[in-house]
Amino acid sequence: MELSDANLQTLTEYLKKTLDPDPAIRRPAEKFLESVEASQNYPLLLLTLLEKSQENVIKVCASVTFKNYIKRNWRIVEDEPNKICESDRIAIKANIVPLMLSSPEQIQKQLSDAISIIGREDFPQKWPDLLTEMVNRFQSGDFHVINGVLHTAHSLFKRYRHEFKSNELWTEIKLVLDAFALPLTNLFKATIELCSTHANDASALKVLFSSLILIAKLFYSLNFQDLPEFFEDNMETWMTNFHSLLTLDNKLLQTDDEEEAGLLELLKSQICDNAALYAQKYDEEFQPYLPRFVTAIWNLLVTTGQEVKYDLLVSNAIQFLASVCERPHYKHLFEDQNTLTSICEKVVVPNMEFRAADEEAFEDNSEEYIRRDLEGSDIDTRRRAACDLVRGLCKFFEGPVTGIFSGYVNSMLQEYAKNPAVNWKHKDAAIYLVTSLASKAQTQKHGITQANELVNLTEFFVNHIQPDLKSASVNEFPVLKADGIKYIMIFRNQVPKEQLLISIPLLINHLQAESIVVHTYAAHALERLFTMRGTNNTTLITAAEMAPFVEVLLTNLFKALTLPGSSENEYIMKAIMRSFSLLQESIIPYIPSVITQLTQKLLAVSKNPSKPHFNHYMFESICLSIRITCKANPDAVGSFEEALFMVFTEILQNDVQEFIPYVFQVMSLLLEMHKNEIPSSYMALFPHLLQPVLWERTGNIPPLVRLLQAYLERGANTIASAAADRIPGLLGVFQKLIASKANDHQGFYLLNSIIEHMPPESIDQYRKQIFILLFQRLQNSKTTKFIKSFLVFINLYCIKYGALALQEIFDSIQPKMFGMVLEKIIIPEIQKVSGQVEKKICAVGITKILTECPPMMDTEYTKLWTPLLQALIGLFELPEDDTIPDEEHFIDIEDTPGYQTAFSQLAFAGKKEHDPVGQMVNNPRIHLAQSLHKLSTACPGRVPSMLSTSMNAEALQYLQGYLQAASVTLL
């Protein structure tokens, strides 16, 4: 694409259309942009538009399109074409920083994100002058520019907070510190001075405080991995200023908004984080400053109100105290009983209260409430922080703290008992306090794994939790119901099994509650209880114990999906999946109605898939229905196909990308259930599965390969007779996969199924070409993964077509090639093969080469006979060689850049491991002994003489053992 006015005009029109609410206009425009994004100059046209366009909406749209384009295409993936040409890359890096700094804030943010995406790939090696360019802008004095630089630096450096330590990372951080630490410190000092100069100018303060927040965030990122020497030397400057900012109060910066945190709150929150980082990681160096921070943060906590806008500040301040009180160094600060009482009274209890804002979220924003409360993303809630503080205090002062709080819990429960309708919030706080006191260690999978011995959990459960759940109405006091259900969920390992069994019908009953939080918690609690393990690794709660509740459980779960706000509730769908898995054949009578409801749901959500977890569990539930029913009655597979195929066809025709990998997995499962020939409905689909466009998406590859394997296993003869013209297409797919380091193993899965199942004459003409392709790949890039797959393939070929056929095809490509493969690949690399079935295939294949291949006995290949036998004994007896050369790193399928539906494996569509050797050979060692015996009968004297000349003594000993076990001798 030329950088011309005409192209700018065209691009403007298409960008406008992508904003149109009408899909008939929007979709074609999106498709057009997708089709031209590979053209040279496309990104430069977008940058020109966002700089020169007269319409603000086009500028913003161009900046978002540009950022997403960079996100999808900047990373260079091995084996895949480079999607942005080199000249465009250079031009983008040369222009983007100045353009970002001169753009209005809305566009600046998009470009800053784009810079950090490019930086993640190119900085520092391929973009060495980025830092200098940014640091030079600090001198400009223009805070719009400075904030742009700080924002970009923050998005570039924040990954240091969660990267694993490595030399590469240290080198990069050192480079950044050398260039950035001093200018950042000078900017920090200058900004603080400007704050006092402009103390009465509200608009100037807003800009300056935005800078200070970003500077404080950068401080956190740069200090996270280790304490840099520069910051240790300049600790006085940073900490003194941080401390004075914590105590600063400027009326001009206070906001009237009760919900949204203002700049002052955000800055103080970040400073609390920074102080907590130093207190935890660098306590020795930080010790001189700690007492004044504890005092400042304590005062902050005692004087800050209950409004929502202070939540982040209060929770970070409490987290600071929590991190300090856990360190043996600082134990003395908290030892006094009065201090402990004061913390409990003034910090913990007030921040455990259920506020009006929490009640509002519980009722009107339940999804957010559940996410914060259940999934632990409530890191920045006051309650979570108060909970962590209690846990931290209990580390050294468990007795006194439990004593202080027990008094509070009792008085709160008494208040509640006086007038439940008015005082229910007291009971809510009491339950929360008990939970935070009792739980020492917790995991998502097992709930509480370590509990405070001083709290009687079962007694509290029976006296205070069960009565709420047994009450006649499931809709009264919804917050207390949710608390009670959460209590069961958290302490499921501490409460005795008989109490859990009493709770199950209560939980099933609460699936009908109107409150989204209550019926979601009920579903989640059931799902967690069903996964608990009892003795000998079976489920703690058995299908027999659930028998009386099957019908009401299934009815209420599916009914819950019809309640307002829960039509795509992932917790309910997960509970459906887990119930099927636990109940197994008990669900068969209900399958007809269940599968109808699941298909209707599938049809509805396929129109606009928006909840990935919900969708995943829905497909798992469909797979379980199929498995459980067809295990009892294999002929039922037809009725599932009738129910599902109409929806599947619609999903494939409308190209619902998120669902296609799932559909292929379910179809594989159904097809594998067929015992005889492939039904015609599947054959009609076969040609479509070979279309290149389907194979472009990485997420489709594993399920598509499996589906094609199912076609080959069940219908190789049909394909050979009725669709022989499709065999080149099938091999084309193999050729595409084998060329990619990420997917070559999938190519081998497909090839192995072709070799194993297709009638030999149908692929005769292609065989030599297959081997040539494999050799070309071996020459170009030989990786461990490829070698392992290649070894399994040639041995499978040998089993299927005979050792002589293998030798002949190798030597027809190039004379003496067979010997080279034995010497350079099979003998040295066989130890790398892993997996029971794979090892068995290799053992049987090599045995055939040793004993059924005449050229091995009387040509120049004979010298390889003993080393090959020795390698085979090594495969049996030596540990597997799992070393991988340093220069090899395989990109994970999931790690491909940009938004692409990654492949999600359905656990309940799992494929049984297939053994192509099967019953033909049960014990490969015995098989080797018998085959050697047969060979020695055919040519007496040869085998023992070959063994005696160059066989390693230890290997010989193992071989004697195999011969004895098989009761044979060598002649």
Image (spheres, grey):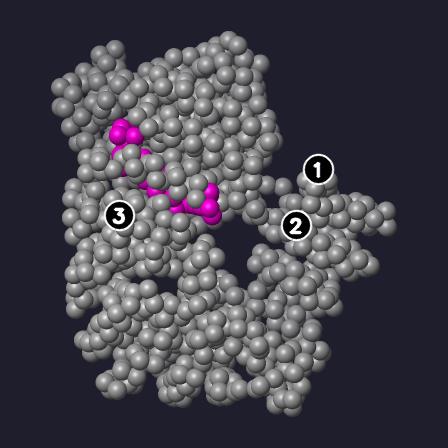
Q: Which residues are magenta?
A: 564-588
In the rendered image, residue 575 lying in the magenta stretch gets the answer yes
Residue 103 lies in what quarter of the image? bottom right
Mark closer to the chain start, 3 or 2: 2
Mark-to-mark CA distance, 2 and 1:
23 Å
Front residue of 602/669: it is 602
In the rendered image, residue 206 lying in the magenta stretch gets the answer no
Residue 741, visible in the rendered structure: no
- Amino acid type at circle 2 is Tyr
Q: Secondary structure at mark 3?
A: helix
Residue 24's tag is 1
**Residue under label 3:** 506
Residue 286: percent from left, percent from top: 39, 83
Q: Is residue 850 left or right of residue 937?
A: right
Give the crowd class for mark 2: few <14, some 14-19, many >=20 residues within 10 Å: many
Q: Is residue 395 left or right of residue 381?
A: left
Give the crowd class for mark 1: few <14, some 14-19, many >=20 residues within 10 Å: few
Give the crowd class for mark 3: few <14, some 14-19, many >=20 residues within 10 Å: some
Q: Secondary structure at mark 1?
A: helix
Mark-to-mark CA distance, 3 and 2:
52 Å
